[in-house]
Image (spheres, grey):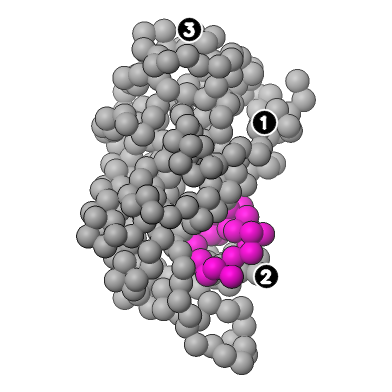
């Protein structure tokens, strides 16, 4: 049984992704500011912006009960770091930046110094610079891939780019595998009920390039990251293979991004946030498409 510490497991994406890891047979402990209602994963309330708390948490007993017969800490095999301020307009920008950057630095530093060789961090599709742009902005090209020259203007995406660079630096110095997931719009199972409304206004999701990823598929991608070793530092888009629109991809591009160049040939409903690298290098397979849950 591999032992995984998951940060932010009480959040929207985290609680589903964490459950997937439990279902895969991992022992998981959640680090968060809010408890997770899951009897199989204990939550340790931890302020990740405090380096001392992070070091202590990563060397804590991971079991479920304070009356367990043996409460000695055991080696952690992997870290999945999802905890963050999840978007702009929740706290002031400088506080968002501080929390997201320092929590990630503290997690990666502690993990590397404790000899944990597999770290997965949550980056974001916002790094491509369109989603939270202060004025309308178009991508340089589609589909968005990991080779894109990310250049956002907002503090949230900037914090994620800094976190990617932090991960790269620690991977270089330590030899650890640190994978950053640029996560698309996360969809919980109950949120498929929203899709018909989105279909009526296809321009509503233009800024996210109609991306989405089922929270359970995101958990599977975390599983593939944990099980795939030897890649050093890598960035992977975390997205479904199709768009969240019922319109063909070519129609979306023609109506909303007619001037943006397209690299290669896209299939009829192919995503504009490419998951090709995750499929090829991690063996990721999408299991949940909106077409399984939304009636035509």
**276 to the left or right of 173:** right
Q: Quadrant of residue 199?
A: top right
Is 99 placed above or below 54 here?
above
Image quadrant where one finds the N terminus = bottom right
**Residue tagged by mark 2?**
39
Labelled disc at residue 290: 1
**Residue tagged by mark 3?**
254
- Judged from the image, the secondary structure of the residue bearing numbered disc 1 is helix
Is 22 placed above or below 142 here?
below
Is 204 placed above or below 14 here?
above
Question: Which of pointers 1 and 2 lies earlier in the amino acid sequence?
Answer: 2
Q: Decide: few, some or many residues near mark 1? Use Cα within 10 Å; few <14, some 14-19, many ≥20.
A: many
| Residue 12 visible in image | no
Q: Position of residue 217 (x, y in %)?
A: 60, 44
- Residue at the image point whose x is 38% and y is 64% from the top: 117
The residue segment tinted magenta is 1-26
- Judged from the image, the secondary structure of the residue bearing numbered disc 2 is loop
Is 295 placed above or below 24 here?
above
Q: Nearer the viewer, residue 215 or 158?
A: 215
Q: Position of residue 74 (x, y in %)?
A: 48, 80
Q: Nearer the viewer, residue 148 or 244?
A: 148
């Amino acid at each position: 049984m591999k032992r995984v510490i998951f940060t932010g497991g009480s959040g929207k994406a985290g609680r589903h992704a964490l459950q997937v890891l439990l279902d895969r047979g991992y022992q998981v402990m959640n680090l968060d500011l809010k408890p997770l209602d899951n009897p199989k994963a204990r939550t340790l309330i931890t302020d990740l912006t405090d380096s001392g708390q992070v070091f202590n948490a990563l060397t804590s007993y991971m079991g479920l009960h304070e009356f367990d017969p043996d409460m000695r800490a055991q080696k952690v095999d992997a870290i999945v770091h999802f905890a963050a301020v999840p978007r702009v307009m929740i706290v002031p920008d400088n506080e968002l930046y501080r929390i997201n950057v320092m929590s990630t630095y503290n997690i990666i530093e502690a993990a590397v110094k404790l000899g944990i060789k597999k770290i997965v961090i949550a980056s974001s599709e916002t790094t491509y610079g369109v989603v939270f742009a202060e004025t309308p902005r178009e991508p340089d090209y589609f589909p968005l891939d990991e080779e894109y020259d990310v250049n956002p203007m907002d503090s949230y995406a900037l914090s994620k780019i800094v976190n990617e660079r932090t991960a790269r630096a620690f991977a270089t110095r330590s030899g650890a595998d640190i994978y950053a997931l640029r996560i698309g719009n996360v969809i919980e199972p109950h949120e498929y009920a929203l899709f018909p409304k989105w279909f009526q206004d296809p321009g509503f999701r233009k800024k996210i390039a109609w991306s989405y990823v089922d929270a359970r598929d995101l958990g599977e991608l975390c599983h593939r990251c944990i099980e795939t070793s030897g890649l050093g530092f890598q960035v992977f888009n975390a997205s479904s293979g199709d768009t969240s629109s019922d319109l063909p991809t070519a129609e979306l591009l023609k109506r909303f991004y007619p001037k943006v160049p397209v690299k290669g040939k896209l299939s009829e409903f192919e995503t504009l946030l490419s998951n090709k690298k995750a499929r090829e290098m991690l063996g990721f397979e999408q299991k949940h498409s909106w077409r399984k849950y939304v009636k035509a």
